[in-house]
Amino acid sequence: MAMSQKQKNSLILLTLVLIGLNMRPLLTSIGPMLPQLREASGLSFSLAALLTALPVIAMGILALAGNWLSRYISERYSVALSLLFIALGALLRDLAPHSAILLSSALLGGIGIGIIQAIIPGVIKRLFHRRMPVVMGLWSAALMGGGGLGAALTPWLAQQSAVWYHALAWWALPAIVALIGWILQRTTATPDTQPNAPIASLRLHLHPRVWILGIYFGLINGGYTSLIAWLPPYYMQSGSSAQSSGSLLALLTLGQAAGALLMPILTRHQDRRKVLLFALLLQLAGFCGFIWLPQQLPVCWALLCGFGLGGAFPLSLVLALDHSPHAPIAGRLVALMQGIGFIIAGVSPWLSGFLRSVTGNYLVDWVFHALCVVGLMLLTLRFVPSRYPAAWREVP
């Protein structure tokens, strides 16, 4: 019996959620295990930061290369190959934790994550045009939820494993499940039939708005990458256990998932600035809490920061997609924004590790990110829909 279009769309959404759940555990599973990994591998704070920074930088480079990759590999095979990379990256961590193995696993997984994150927003724009903010929120919530699972379950898996670092390899399993789900989908990765010539003629990478969006996206995600890398060590330095510190990171990602689901629903029209400003205000409150009252209400600060970060992530993607009604142009714009942004965000945990080495604590880093949020709030005011580049809207 043939499925209705509604049933097909539901299966596509389920597949997207399964894929989204695999976008963050490779990053967030490291934080709660970082003291043990550093002791076993001899990594310095700066090199340990690369376990988070490398995948994020790889995301940026692959997003920039997305247009080139699409000429040679279809969406369907790109996503399948990327999920395989993520699974292999996790499986590498089943080996003894040497620095070269850990960094290779981070790079391999980051390549897979980067390709998928460059492709999926365009797929959502094409297949769910009328429900784009809601579906983008669902996709983003799956990303954040996967990050929470990585942070919360990895210490528990380490306790159940014969060798503690085998816990990191278990995250290959959901990638394999998502790969099977993607392969079974016949309609998700339909090739885009719209011509690519208008994109080339626009030279999007030379437009100042693309770089503004990239910096905006990068600074938002820079706060996230620093938190997932250093929030558990920050509290473990104060005497918290790996399990409780990992749980705090899980609560942050729970807040992110809630923000990603709820905030896009609040955007009733194309001007996203009010909701974005609210998301950034929540982030600012969370960072200020980590600075001034870290031990009093850590759960509150984690949830506030998480809710703000989670809401800002899909809204920034929707903000970029809003710039053009044409899926190829919008998809390419989002890919460029993510490319620039993830490279910036990838530097953030390394900078945090460097500041930790120099100052002996994390407060300078939290102050830096709080100031970045203030700058982002000012930048948000520039995104007036009537001032979006006309050429991006009028290309046939």
Image (tube, rainbow, N blue to C red):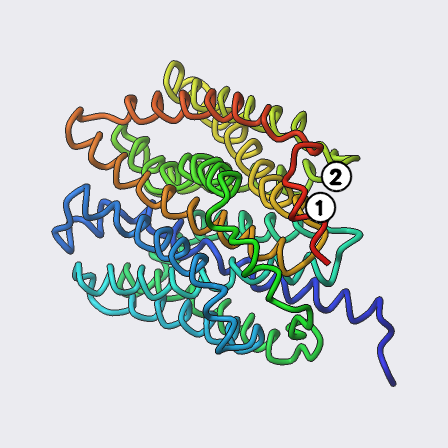
**Residue drawn at the location 77% of the way across and 51% of the way down:** 131
**Callout 2: helix, strand or loop?**
helix
- Residue 359 at x, y = what percent? 17, 24
Task: Give the mark, 1 or 2, whose residue is nearer the N terminus.
Answer: 1
Q: Amino acid at mark 1?
A: Pro
Relative to 96, 148 lies left or right = right
Q: In the figure, 78 relative to 157: above or below? A: below
- Please indicate, yes or no, whether residue 354 appears anywhere in the rendered image: yes
Relative to 372, 141 lies left or right = right
Q: Residue furthest left?
A: 42
Q: In the figure, 282 relative to 158: above or below? A: above
Relative to 68, 334 lies left or right = right
**Callout 1: helix, strand or loop?**
helix
**Residue drawn at the location 38% of the way across and 14% of the way down:** 292
Which residue is denoted by mark 1 in the rendering? Answer: 133
Which residue is denoted by mark 2 in the rendering? Answer: 265
**Residue drawn at the location 43% of the way across and 44% of the way down:** 341
How would you rate the neighbour count of disc 2 (Cα within 10 Å): few for under 14, some for 14-19, many for 20 or more?
some
Quadrant of the image containing the N terminus: bottom right
